Image (cartoon, helix red, strand yellow):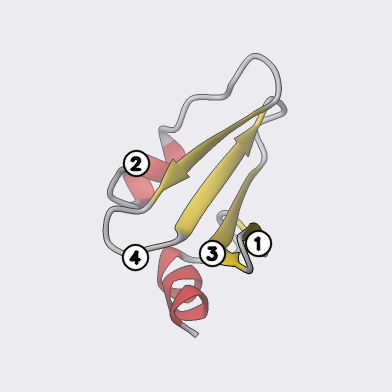
Amino acid sequence: RIAFTVRNLNDLPTPETGRATYYDERTPGLSIRVTATGAKSFSFVRWANGRMVRVTLGSWPSTTTAKARSEALK
């Protein structure tokens, strides 16, 4: 878990392969995924009927942290 600040999100390392997922320390279920190509996108993760459900909220930086948190709380 990390604080989703502009600086922290800009400084996230790019994985060599696949994706890396980081969770917000402030908003439960909010995460950002970083791909090997450097793309970053916000998503919301929750459990429903024993299965994980992931909803993509938008890409960083066109979707702000405040907007992603607001969408995650809906």
Compute the Cα span from label 4 to label 1.
Answer: 16 Å
Q: Callout 2, which amino acid?
A: Asn
Crowd class of label 3 (few under 14; some 14 to 19; many from 20; radius 10 Å): some
Residue picked out by circle 1: 53
Give the number of the mark in front: 4 or 1.
1
Compute the Cα span from label 2 to label 3.
Answer: 24 Å
Residue drawn at x 65%, y 59% is 54
Q: Secondary structure at mark 4?
A: loop
Question: Label 2 near label 1: C-beta < 8 Å?
Answer: no
Compute the Cα span from label 4 to label 2.
Answer: 15 Å
Compute the Cα span from label 4 to label 3.
Answer: 12 Å
Residue drawn at x 36%, y 63% is 28
Q: How many marks?
A: 4
Nearer to the camera, 18 or 36: 18
The first of marks 2 and 3 along the sequence is 2
Q: Secondary structure at mark 1?
A: strand
Question: Label 1 near label 3: C-beta < 8 Å?
Answer: yes
Residue picked out by circle 3: 46
Q: From the viewer's perspective, is 2 left or right of 72?
A: left
The first of marks 4 and 2 along the sequence is 2
Q: Secondary structure at mark 2?
A: helix
